[in-house]
Image (cartoon, helix red, strand yellow):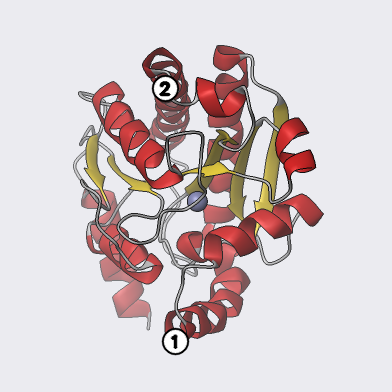
Amino acid sequence: MPLLRSVLLCLLLAAPAGAAPRVVIDPGHGGAQEGAAGLGLDEKDLALQLALRLKDALAGAAEVTLTREDDTHVELADRVARANARRVDLFISLHANSMPTRRQRARTQGIETYFLSASASGEDARRTAAQENGEARGGAQRKADDTLGFILADLQRQGAHADSSRLAYAVHQRLVKATGALDRGVQQAPFTVLTGVDAPAILVEVGFISHPTEGLRLKDPRYQASLAGAIAEGVKAFMAEVAARESRGQRVVSPGAP
Ligand SMILES: [Zn+2]
């Protein structure tokens, strides 16, 4: 449909230069979905506290909305739908990790930053994605699985995959540097909540809420502030890179556009 493509291209090029990027922050879990149980602080509460801090840290640099502003349950598919309805420029899902056994809980800590891929980087990445995808109910999960193949087929052409990777590295490097936490790397995995987002999208596991020292550190307001500040700096660096690319006329337009 050449006419539709032309119209899309015109709309994209007519977008006001310098408009504040739209960022959606997605605090994981909520309501009855508590996420990982921590040392006096559940994952859902930590995710919301961090999301609010990140929103503050991005004030003036982006137009920020949250997928939830309080302790309520939001379906994974609805989080994506809300982001796409806002024609978001960036999507960041915030989580904390945990380990099942006492032995693993005692020794596993560190920060991981993920972007979407059909296959996981390794066994730990697969386990983390399965844990985070667990709350999707049967129907929503099947729908997400069906969509996954379709979305992944288009990832490379859209450039979103490459941009999600760039965003992940921009955020992750700053997180590790700012906190001194163990670097568990940028990884890839099939996360339901990243599937179908029409923008660069990452999921940050800010630490292991189940680890005896990292779990306590994650409750510390100063530590939370350094996490939020580092994510914000990474987001700003990525947005500056995109703005520079667009000003050089290398703007990414719709796939197949003339
Ligand atoms: Zn989670």
Q: In the image, is 214 to the left or to the right of 17? A: right
Residue 224, disc: 2
Please state which of residues 117 and 226 is positioned toward the viewer in this rendering. 226
Residue 139, disc: 1
Q: In the image, is 86 to the left or to the right of 137? A: left
**For residue 205, above or below residue 158:** above
Residue at 61 percent of width and 33 percent of height: 169
Q: Quadrant of the N terminus?
A: bottom left
**For residue 258, above or below residue 105:** below
Q: Mark 1 or mark 2, which is nearer the start of the sequence? A: 1
Q: Is residue 93 visible?
A: no
Badge 1 element: helix
Q: Is residue 228 visible?
A: yes
Do labels 2 and 1 touch, CB within 8 Å? Answer: no
Where residue 110 sits: x, y (%)?
67, 30
Q: Locate residue 248: give its quadrant.
A: top left
Q: Amino acid at mark 1?
A: Gly
Number of other residues with Cα within 10 Å of mark 2, as a class: few under 14, some 14 to 19, many 20 or more: many
Residue 9, disc: none
Number of other residues with Cα within 10 Å of mark 1, as a class: few under 14, some 14 to 19, many 20 or more: few
